[in-house]
């Protein structure tokens, strides 16, 4: 059993934006001895103030720039729309702040590289907010695979789907904000596949259904690897809530 000693002081975190997921995040971390949400920012002062009062946060800022300039913060949580992740993660790194960025980290490889280049240059950490990666069952799965208990991994199937309950005005339906099933839900499945397989696929074949706005409502993809392994990914925003994965090896599943 691993023990963890408490830090001399909690990590002082600022929330960059007042999205619904940010409200849930602030309330969830309130009980943590390792992290403390000390400030929140919005482009509207009244929005930031209301958020701070609702979540018991001591300071609020009426601009994102003011939060990044707050010398009493160590890191920021970035829950802005997907299309804004790269811009504000880079600005946060330049301000000397560590960044916990909501998934998906970026909209392109070029954006992701620029974000990590900025983090390295300014000696801060950049982390994509995938909770599953730190959950006990993920560690247990990786340990089982490392021990070879199911032999050599030959394939992975991963699926993540949900019913979008509030489609009117939902940013998931806006292509200009980085919406769509693959970026919003499929990133979980793809992240897990990459974690298990250890390398990028050699070839990908995908098929999607499309919303009237132009974003993908559902997607299925087959991933082919140079050593003959395969993976299947599915994601959707118009199905019953589900998230599951199966890893198939030469000795077990």
Image (tube, helix red, strand yellow):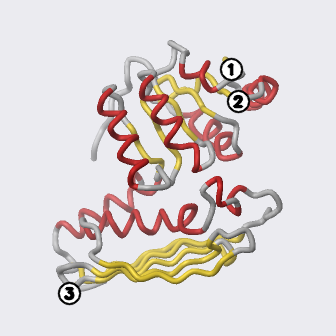
Question: Which element carries disc 3, helix, strand or loop?
Answer: loop
Q: Are marks 3 and 1 in contact (CB under 8 Å)?
A: no
Between the C-alphas of marks 2 and 1, the distance is 7 Å
Picture coordinates of residue 8, whole percent (x, y): 38, 17
Tell me, yes or no, if residue 156 can be seen here: no
Which quadrant of the figure has residue 153?
Answer: bottom left
Earlier sequence position, callout 3 versus callout 1: 1
**The quadrant where residue 180 appears:** bottom right
* Residue at image coords 49%, 42%: 86
Residue holding disc 2? 42
State the CA–CA distance, disc 2 to disc 3. 52 Å
Q: Foreground mark, 3 or 1?
A: 1
Image coordinates of residue 160 in percent, x first then y, are 54, 71
Look at 68% across and 70% down and name the residue there. 214
Q: Which mark sits nearer the N-terminus, 2 or 1?
A: 2
Which disc, if any, is residue 61? 1
Q: Residue at x 50, y 75 (%)?
A: 159
The reply to whether callout 2 and callout 1 are in contact (CB within 8 Å) is yes
Which residue has dot 3 on it?
Answer: 250
Mark 2 vs mark 3: give the one in front: 2
Q: Is residue 159 above or below residue 91?
A: below
Q: From what the image shows, is residue 12 above or below residue 18?
A: above
């Amino acid at each position: 059993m691993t023990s963890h000693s408490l830090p001399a002081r909690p990590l002082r975190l600022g929330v960059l934006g007042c999205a619904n997921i940010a409200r849930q995040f602030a309330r969830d971390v309130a009980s943590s001895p390792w992290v403390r949400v000390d400030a929140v920012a919005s482009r509207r002062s009244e929005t930031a103030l209301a958020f701070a009062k609702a979540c018991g946060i001591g300071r609020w800022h009426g601009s994102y720039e003011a939060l990044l300039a707050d010398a009493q913060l160590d890191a920021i949580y970035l829950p802005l729309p997907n299309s804004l992740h790269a811009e504000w993660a880079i600005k946060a790194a330049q301000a000397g702040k560590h960044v916990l960025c909501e998934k998906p980290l970026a909209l392109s490889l070029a954006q992701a590289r620029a974000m990590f280049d900025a983090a390295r240059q300014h000696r801060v950490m950049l982390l994509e907010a995938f909770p599953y990666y730190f959950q006990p069952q993920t560690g247990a799965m990786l340990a089982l695979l490392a021990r070879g208990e199911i032999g050599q991994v030959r394939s992975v199937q991963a699926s993540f789907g949900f019913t979008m309950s509030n489609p009117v005005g939902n940013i998931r339906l806006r292509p200009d904000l980085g919406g769509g099933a693959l970026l919003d839900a499929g990133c979980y499945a793809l992240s897990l596949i990459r974690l298990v397989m250890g390398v990028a696929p050699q070839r990908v074949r995908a098929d999607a259904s499309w919303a009237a706005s132009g974003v993908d409502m559902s997607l299925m993809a087959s991933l082919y690897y140079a050593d003959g392994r395969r993976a299947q990914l599915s994601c959707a925003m118009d199905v019953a809530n589900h998230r599951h994965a199966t890893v198939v090896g030469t000795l077990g599943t």
